Image: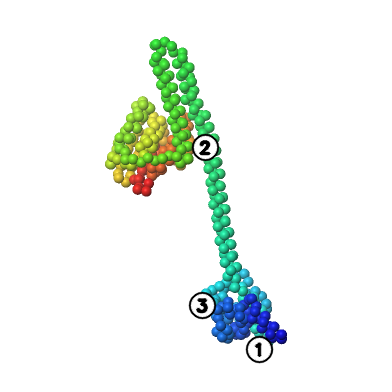
Amino acid sequence: MTTRQEFEALFNNAAIGIITVNQSGEIVLINEFALKQFGYHREEIIGQKIEMLIPTRYKVRHEQHRDEYYGHNPHSRPMGSGMDLYAVKKGGKEFPVEVSLSTYKTDEGIFAIAFVSDISIRKQSENELVKLNAELEQKVKERTQSLSEALEKEKELNELKSRFVSMASHEFRTPLSTILSSAYLMAKYQQTEDQPKRDRHIQRIVSSVNMLNDILNDFLSVGKIEEGKIQVRYAEIDIEENISGTINELQTIIKPGQKIDYTHEGERYFILDASLLKHIVMNLVSNAIKFSPENSCITVHTKCTKQELILSVADQGVGISKEDQQHLFERFFRGGNVTNIQGTGLGLHIVAKYAELMNGTIGCRSELEEGTEFIINFKEKTESE
């Protein structure tokens, strides 16, 4: 086999596209592999500019690079190092390529040889790998987020337990001491004429037991809220009757000279959970009683339409500072000016959560020593709810 035959065999059987271009950018040689790569017949491509194999958006720039390549000591090198290169088939379909350049010189001038590799499969694998890495990163991010949330939740629960122990030990001590001392003193009163004294201590015991029961109910309510176990049982209720009944139950704990003034306007019925509404009213009104002086008025007002119910409870009590108002609905929070008054700091947190469960929002207006008003706005229950 002659050298020419060997060259032709190597050229035409190479498993890579080989294209030879003259200094004018015209294709003078192309092997069979390259013809199949680009989808042309030999007669369609020989003598044509090399730019016919390059996407339109790159043609002008490529002509400049080609002229610079021939004009500045052409040598063997990869083309477009570090860049994504694309070629275009006869039908206009683009595909990614790698191109290595070499040159040779004859009497007819300098010729450039381009070795063209179709890297579509490799690019597809790279893209799939990038996609897989992105999915893995997202999963790691989600798992990390879930773990962080779980750790934060555990931290909150531990804090809740710690504050519960601290609060319980403090809040339980007073009523338990009262019960113990009253029971001890009752044993001393054995005469008939001592009955009034016994009655007084019985009342103190009953009051202390009720206080303990309220504290435990608050803790149980918070536990159920945290675990998502509060079920809202919607029903059409008589707002005026429901709130009037609740206020009547609270008449036994009002201070001397205090009075509760309740007014209602608008529609009489609204769809809510009667039990949760009663708890909200009892909490807000009992707080108003607790933090207001004797001979003061507590105002309760409801305004009802078919679209919303607005409940407001206002007192003439000690008020809440602007700074404390930012934390009012947090668990265990108590204002700096009421630490000497018994309470768990859970009531308003529970009220806010109950309101939220019934599509309601709560707000507060208050000034120190000028009283406080809580306003809850319940929106109409939708069909989906």
Of the two numbered discs 2 and 1 on the same chain, state the one appearing first in sequence.
1
Q: Amino acid at mark 1?
A: Glu
Q: CA distance from mark 2 to mark 1?
A: 90 Å
**Label 2: element kind:** helix
Dividing the picture into quarters, in which one does residue 239 lie?
top left
Q: Amino acid at mark 2?
A: Leu
Residue 10 point in image, percent of width and height: 67, 80
Residue 281 image offset from top left, x and y in percent: 37, 35
In this rendering, the count of numbered labels is 3
The N terminus lies in which quarter of the figure? bottom right
Can you tell which quarter of the image residue 264 is in?
A: top left
Q: Residue at x 53, y 39 (%)?
A: 157
Q: CA distance from mark 1 to mark 3?
A: 33 Å
Q: Are marks 2 and 1 in contact (CB under 8 Å)?
A: no
Task: Tell me which residue sits at (49%, 27%) in the image.
Answer: 172
Vertical order, 139 against 77 (above or below)? above
Q: Residue 160 — which label?
A: 2
Q: Residue at x 45, y 16 (%)?
A: 186
Q: Mark 2 or mark 3: which is in front?
A: 3
Residue under numbered circle 1? 108
Q: Is residue 12 above or below residue 354?
A: below
Residue 344 appears left or right of 128: left
Q: Nearer the viewer, residue 116 or 149?
A: 116
Return the residue at label 3. 91
Residue 192 image offset from top left, x and y in percent: 39, 11
Instruction: Between residue 257 and residue 138, name the one nearer to us.
Output: 138
Q: Earlier in the sequence, mark 1 or mark 3?
A: 3
For mark 3, does the 10 Å Cα neighbourhood hold few (<14), some (14 to 19), or many (20 or more) residues? few
Q: Is residue 311 left or right of residue 125?
A: left
Q: Which percent across, then down, holds residue 59?
A: 55, 78
Q: Is residue 14 visible?
A: yes
